[in-house]
Amino acid sequence: MTQVREGKHRQNLFIEMHLPSESYSESASPSRSVPVRPVIFVVEDEEDIARLISHNLQGAGYEVQSFVSAASVLTEAVREMPALFLLDVMLPGTDGFELCRHIRQTPVLSATPIIFLTAKTSESDRVKGLELGGDDYITKPFSPRELVARVRSVLRGLGTERAASEVLRLGELEIDVSSMTVQVQGRNVMTTVREFRLLEYLAAHRGRVLTRDQLLDAVWKETPFVTPRSIDVYIRRLREKIEPDARHPQYLKTLRGIGYRFEVPK
């Protein structure tokens, strides 16, 4: 308990240092119509941290709805359909990991991006967060500027920068780039933003051996703190979704000591 209190004390000092001046607004001209602002659900039980997060996200052009626990998050999310969830892990009652699991099991929310923002810093916690369906994992204390950048990076994956008509048909797998949807044998498969971007990149470079560092540069180029181990977690999640037998993959092949290669089954 003493260690937790000390950690929270350091976070509060960090907040006091950053809250008054750190605002990264992109103000619109008053003569222009203001576009609809994406809504981000922030689940954080520490009031000062929640206030810091809200302050910076609102300054960056987002609407924020804050929750101190997981109790009403799913109900409100189904009604409002947020653009992204930002979840603390250590919450009263249902923790952030369990909330992530529930979000991924709710059909209308299952593809909504999730970023963990937590004081749990061990590699096992990071891996657990990614395995449960997290798109990113940020540890406390955090830089508000980095937080905003990583939120933007995840949401940018939902944009329409790719060719609008491109559909990759590879064996029994179909990847629709414009709608960011995946089908296996005509059945829709729900993927997170990062999962889709990784699968699309591998499929677009099918036949080539890609190292973990190459995949990190391509899919996580604006998120420098993701480790090569994360690639293995995402590959494992994708195999469970698209492979007939995840233990004997047909599409996502491992080259031991090197990386991965996408192959089209013959």
Image (tube, rainbow, N blue to C red):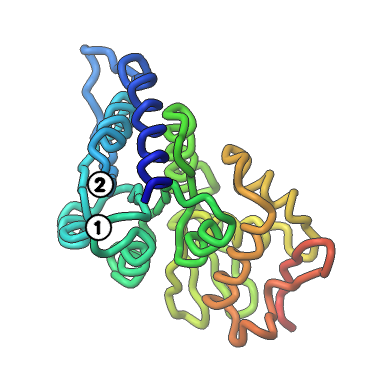
Seen from the viewer's position, the closer of residues 153 and 31 is: 153
**In the image: residue 123, left or right of residue 39:** right
Question: In the current view of this chain or complex, which residue is farthest to the right?
Answer: 257
**Circle 2 sits in a helix, a strand or a loop, which is it?**
loop
- For mark 1, what is the residue? 92
250 horizontally vs 167: left or right: right
| Amino acid at dot 1 | Pro
What label does residue 193 carry, if any?
A: none
Q: Quadrant of residue 60?
A: top left
* Residue labelled with disc 2: 45
Left or right of 56 on screen, residue 72: left
Give the camera-side residue of 4 and 126. Answer: 4
The residue under the point 75% across, 65% down is 260
Q: Are marks 1 and 2 in contact (CB under 8 Å)?
A: yes
As drawn, 136 above or below 256 = above
Mark 2: which amino acid? Answer: Asp
Instruction: Please tell me which residue is depicted at 18% across the width and 52% down the height of the picture.
Output: 80
Q: Can residue 147 be seen here?
A: yes
Q: Residues within 10 Å of mark 2 (few under 14, many from 20)?
A: some
Q: Tell me the quarter of the picture where residue 54 sits.
A: top left
Q: Quadrant of the C terminus?
A: bottom right
